[in-house]
């Protein structure tokens, strides 16, 4: 029997997020606890590609059993579609080795997004209601979010222009530098984010849009 994967649930009024504790970015939502866990399991094969990119071990049957180790009340942001809440495990200390593992998964999320974006057309299929950003607007949105997220780590960069590879690399290198070291779990900047939460939030946002591009461009893997 597969070893259970520890997850937490963020409970909004209309939406529930299920998020892995140990694999930053592996977070999915649903209307109920059960549906969020089903969605998380469905995305295990996709997250396996992130772990492979990072050279991080990922259980072959990772989506078969979950252990809910914490439930936290969500907010309007949860219902809007953001895993927004900091949970108790985020305050835990990180060794240098654990921090390095976390960083490699964040870097892998960027690599997966870049690979999917390069294989996609500029114009994506519209969503079920006829909406949704096209590829470049979505990538620009990701960069804007990363510049904002970086400030929660004490890293201040203007939002890079899409295609400015030097500026994008500089921003991401400084995010990596902020997250790489051992930590006692405290926020990395005043009123900022603890490193575990920061890695999860950054990787989730990158992968959420990577997988959206993948789906709306008809890519199969």
Image (tube, rainbow, N blue to C red):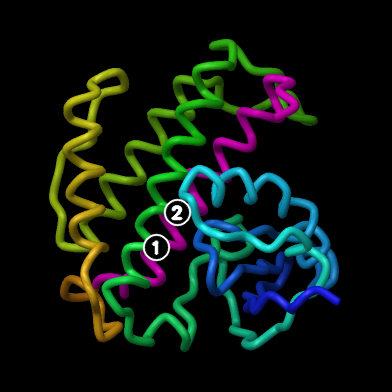
Tell me the number on the disc at residue 101. 1
Q: In this view, does 36 lie to the left or right of 24?
A: right
Vertical relation: 84 (above or below) 113: below
The magenta stretch is 192-221
Q: Is mark 1 on a helix, strand or loop?
A: helix
Mark 1 Cα-neighbour bin, 10 Å: few <14, some 14–19, many ≥20: some
Q: Position of residue 50 (x, y in %)?
A: 55, 46
Q: Does residue 44 show up magenta in the picture?
A: no
- Classify the position of the N terminus by image quarter: bottom right
Dominant SS type (magenta): helix
Q: Position of residue 147 (x, y in %)?
A: 26, 45
Q: Where is residue 17 in the image (x, y as percent from the top left)?
A: 66, 67
Tell me the number on the disc at residue 60. none
Q: Quadrant of residue 65?
A: bottom right
Q: In which quarter of the image is residue 183?
A: bottom left
The alpha-carbon separation of the residues under discs 2 and 1 comes to 7 Å
Tell me the number on the disc at residue 105. 2
Q: Where is residue 59 in the image (x, y as percent from the top left)?
A: 68, 63
Verify CB contact (< 8 Å) between mark 2 and mark 1: yes
């Amino acid at each position: 029997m597969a070893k259970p994967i520890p997850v937490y649930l963020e409970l909004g009024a209309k939406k529930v997020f299920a998020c892995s504790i140990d694999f930053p970015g592996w977070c999915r939502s649903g209307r109920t606890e059960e549906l969020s866990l089903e969605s998380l399991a469905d995305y295990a094969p996709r997250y396996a590609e992130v772990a492979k990119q990072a050279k991080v071990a990922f259980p072959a049957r990772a989506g078969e059993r979950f252990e809910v180790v914490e439930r936290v009340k969500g907010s309007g942001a949860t219902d809007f579609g953001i895993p927004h809440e900091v949970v108790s495990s985020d305050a835990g200390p990180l060794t240098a080795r654990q921090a390095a593992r976390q960083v490699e998964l964040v870097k892998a999320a960027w690599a997966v997004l870049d690979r999917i974006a390069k294989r996609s057309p500029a114009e994506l299929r519209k969503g079920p209601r006829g909406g949704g950003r096209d590829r470049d607007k979505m990538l620009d949105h990701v960069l804007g979010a990363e510049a904002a997220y970086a400030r929660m780590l004490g890293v201040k960069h203007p939002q890079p222009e899409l295609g400015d590879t030097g500026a994008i690399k500089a921003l991401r290198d400084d995010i990596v530098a902020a997250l790489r070291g051992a930590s006692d779990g405290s926020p990395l900047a005043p009123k900022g984010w603890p490193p575990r939460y920061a890695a999860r939030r950054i990787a989730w946002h990158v992968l959420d849009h990577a997988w959206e591009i993948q789906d709306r461009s008809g890519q199969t893997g």
